[in-house]
Amino acid sequence: MAQSMLVTAWNLAIAGGGILGGLLLDSLGVSAFSPALLVLLTATLIVVWVARQQGFRAMPC
């Protein structure tokens, strides 16, 4: 069941990205992709920076 939920969520994310990208392209044109990409990359950097202590713990030697 978890595997089917993961596949469904992944497919919804891909479809949602395609829809939002198409709307962005249709309404603002190609030049809107660079700022949108910078916003998404900044959000990703913030998530990784905040989660680095929990997700990437150092192994004791």
Image: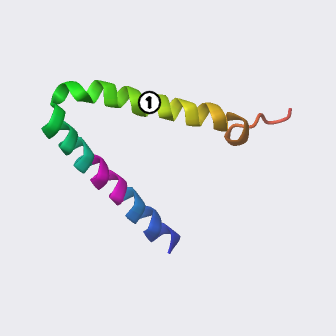
Q: What amino acid is at disc 1?
A: Leu
Q: Residue at x 34, y 59 (%)?
A: 12
Residue ID for mark 1: 41
Quarter holding the C terminus? top right
Q: Position of residue 14 (x, y in %)?
A: 32, 52
Write the residue at 29% across / 24% down: 34
Above or below residue 34? Residue 54 is below
Which region shows up in magenta? 11-17
* Residue placed furthest toward the right: 61
Disc 1 element: helix
Q: Main secondary structure of the magenta part?
A: helix
Residue occupying the far front of the picture = 27
- Which of the 4 quarters of the picture holds residue 60? top right
Q: Is residue 35 left or right of residue 22?
A: right
Q: Is 13 contained in the magenta span?
A: yes
Residue 49 x, y percent position in the rendering = 62, 30
Residue that extends furthest to the bottom in the rendered view of this protein: 1
Q: Quadrant of residue 28?
A: top left
Q: Quadrant of residue 21?
A: top left
**Residue 6 inside the magenta-drawn segment:** no
Q: Residue at x 36, y 53 (%)?
A: 13
Q: Position of residue 9 (x, y in %)?
A: 41, 61
Looking at the picture, tell me which residue is in the foreground, 1 or 39.
Answer: 39
Q: Position of residue 45 (x, y in %)?
A: 53, 30
Q: Residues within 10 Å of mark 1 (few under 14, many from 20)?
A: few
